[in-house]
Image (tube, grey):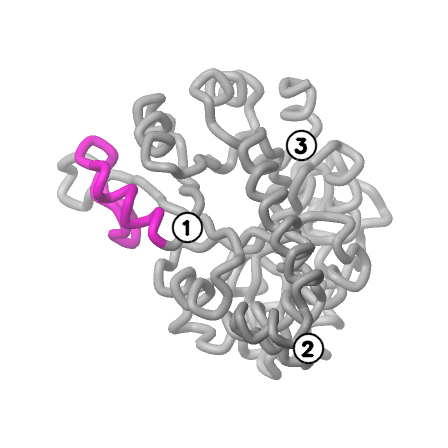
Amino acid sequence: MTIAIRLPLATALALGLAAPLAAQADALQQQLDDLQDFQIIAHRGASGHAPEHTWPAYQQAREMGADYLELDLHMSADGELMVIHDDTLDRTIDGSGKVKDHSLAELKALDAGSWFNQAHPEHADDAYAGAELLTLDEVIDRYGSDVRYYIETKSPERYPELQRALVETLEAEGLVASGSVVIQSFSQDSLEQVHALNADIPLVQLVWYSPAEDGDGLTEWTGVTPPPAEIGDADFQAIADYAVGIGPNVVYDGEDVIDAGFVEQAHDNGLLVHPYTINDPEQMQRLLDWGVDGMFTNFPDRLSGLVE
């Protein structure tokens, strides 16, 4: 893997790199400016229409007007960055066990598409059978900077090398410089590691609100914020120290866990709000009315129709 070398600005200027640095600064600023507009984030690709994290899902997402392709990352036993949501193979792959316990060759031999035809016969396509698990390198090789990527990292305790490997790959491929990537995680540690490696990458803190075990109100899964009813400006500001946005769930078991006030308070503290995973058009419209800055959806076509 090529390792990108980041030079301090003063050193780079002294070496005559002012023009490339200025171009990079312009691209990064353009990305931040674009993020102020509403973003359609294709959750695992157009995963309501095709097997998640496969070429058909990504291609359909692009055709349906998605602004970002969401990618979830795990690592193989031999250190490859694999694009798959679960840490195990059982749900979407014709294999079993943990991703991290299989080599790249073993993972590439598995079928990542047939399950979809069985689970969603209304969207089944014979072409989906036999779809391969993808690596991050394969996705980047195909799309380059023609698309923007919204990448989720998993727990650093599970993959201590993932953050560095990811940042080095993105830098080497020019995707940070071109303003082509956002990184998200439920793990604050993971995001802070990424921020330390490259402060130019926009980060989004994911949160999951659900009932507390004692049944008394809500709790946030990783403890990164208090419950929504107790969250204050200082809590949002703590996230804003390393991230540009927050990605909350909206409902749990059919009940709202955030409201328009949550969105407003996040905005007041300089954070974008990108809720997940919104597939119902009525809920999409409600969140648009709340003023969210983007949404994750399995059906980019539904959201694109509303945004237009």
Say what secondary structure mark 2 lies in: helix
**Which portion, as a residue range, is magenta?**
219-241
Q: Position of residue 65 (x, y in %)?
A: 73, 32
Mark 1 neighbour density, 10 Å: few (under 14) some (14–19) many (20 or more): many
The residue pinned by badge 2 equals 104
Using the numbered discs, state the Cα–Cα distance from disc 2 to disc 1 in whole angstroms.
Answer: 32 Å
Q: Position of residue 116 (x, y in %)?
A: 69, 46
The amino acid beneath tag 2 is Leu
Do tag 3 and tag 2 residues touch (Cβ < 8 Å)?
Answer: no
Mark 2 neighbour density, 10 Å: few (under 14) some (14–19) many (20 or more): many
Residue nearest the observer in this picture, 205 or 186? 205
Please name the residue shown 74% across and 47% down the image: 58
Lateral position of residue 78 relative to residue 57, left or right: left
The residue pinned by badge 1 equals 243
Q: Quadrant of residue 294?
A: top right
Quadrant where the N terminus sits is bottom right
The amino acid beneath tag 3 is Pro
Using the numbered discs, state the Cα–Cα distance from disc 3 to disc 1 in whole angstroms.
Answer: 25 Å
- Residue 70 visible in the displayed image: yes
Q: Position of residue 306 (x, y in %)?
A: 64, 18
Q: Is residue 239 magenta?
A: yes
Lateral position of residue 48 relative to residue 60, left or right: left
Using the numbered discs, state the Cα–Cα distance from disc 3 to disc 2 in whole angstroms.
Answer: 30 Å
Q: Nearer the viewer, mark 3 or mark 2?
A: 3
The amino acid beneath tag 1 is Ala
Residue nearest the observer in this picture, 26 or 205? 26
The residue pinned by badge 3 equals 300
